[in-house]
Amino acid sequence: MREAAVPVNSQTPLRKKAAGLIYKRIRKNWDLYLLALPVLVYFAIFEFYPMYGVQIAFKDFLATKGITGSPWVGLKHFERFFDSYYFWRLIRNTLGIGLYELLVSFPVPIFLALMINEVRNGFFKRFAQTVTYAPHFLSTVVLVGMLFLFLHPQNGVVNHMIEALGFQPISFMTEPGWFKTLFVLSGTWQHMGWSSIIYLAALAGVDPSLHEAARIDGASQLQRIRHINLPSIAPTIVILLILNVGRILSVGFEKVFLMQNPLNMSASDVIATHVYRTGITGAEYSYSASVGLFNSVITFVLLVVVNYIARKVNETSLW
């Protein structure tokens, strides 16, 4: 026999009960919800509300007509980007820098944290932390200025050393082949100390009795690092790896733009700088919005895929 349908009105008490439970929970923890309110308001105003303007990627945006009055053109601007001369160069450069950063900049803070954690001299440990943290507080403009100063073909310290060894000076900042290496290594030097803080915090939570038991069993220092410290911080490493993979295509605009010049454009032109040239300088707002939206969608897909793989392999993920 067919089961009788549940009347809609019979669900009303259940909804009222659920609403009452939610109200009681909010009333009980009102101070916690009040603490989270500014963050929610910030994201609503500055992150979600501006997404309304994403529709200009599918329109021929005219400032006089506004977003709603501009005509729809579908995927016209996406097709223009995919068929353009710059497409593969932008993808190659952006992916190249992003993967280079992931391979170099991601593991270095882990090794640094493991080394600092093994230092037993308190003064030297604090000194090492201060020295490695300090570059993080340099502005990007100052960092790029230091690169130009130290790597100058005629007056740079590095080229003076190269000439002293009997080699010809190298124009590091104008040769395309050096751009990615300089970008990644300078960023690694600047941020490795600051990035190691979270790993040091995770290492501080390792049970000392595990190391004591390992010493009794005759384990060396390297064996204790490999079998105790690394497994203990593995969940933290996985979470940060997922976040870093999600930023592969989000290469920072400011530093690339400051290091960029006409001579190294073939290696330094990335999606962010292309959006700046076309959207801000060239006033092609719809086209630049479509390029930015494409970048955001690919980044989102990468984040979801890597999170899924991490959850299946290591049972650690963002969600």
Image (cartoon, rainbow, N blue to C red):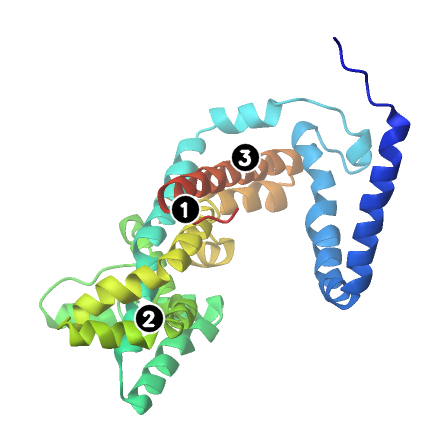
Amino acid type for the residue under numbered disc 2: Ala
Viewer-side residue, 156 vs 285 = 285
**What count of labels does the image hold?**
3
Q: Secondary structure at mark 2?
A: helix
Tell me how far mark 1 sits from mark 2, CA to CA: 24 Å
Figure check: 238 above or below 122: above
Q: Of the residues tagged 3 and 1, which is closer to the observer?
A: 1
The quadrant holding residue 130 is bottom left
- Residue 113 is tagged as 2
What residue did someone put label 3 on? Answer: 294
Q: Is residue 186 left or right of residue 271?
A: left
Amino acid type for the residue under numbered disc 1: Glu
Q: Tell me what residue is drawn at x 70 percent, y 28 percent.
A: 59
Q: Earlier along the polypeptide chain: callout 1 or callout 2?
A: 2
Q: Dot 2, how many residues are within 10 Å of its Cα: few (below 14), some (14-19), or many (20+)?
A: many
What residue did someone put label 1 on? Answer: 315
Q: Dot 1, how many residues are within 10 Å of its Cα: few (below 14), some (14-19), or many (20+)?
A: few
Amino acid type for the residue under numbered disc 3: Phe
Tell me how far mark 3 sits from mark 2, CA to CA: 36 Å
Q: Are marks 1 and 2 in contact (CB under 8 Å)?
A: no
Q: Tell me what residue is drawn at x 77 percent, y 68 percent.
A: 31
Q: Tell me what residue is drawn at x 34 percent, y 59 percent.
A: 105
- Residue 25 is tagged as none
Q: Secondary structure at mark 3?
A: helix
x and y percent of residue 282 in the render?
61, 41
Q: Residue furthest front?
A: 1
Tell me how far mark 3 sits from mark 1, CA to CA: 30 Å
Figure check: 87 above or below 158: above
Q: Is residue 219 left or right of residue 94?
A: left
Viewer-side residue, 247 vs 222 = 222
Q: Are marks 3 and 2 in contact (CB under 8 Å)?
A: no
The quadrant holding residue 239 is bottom left
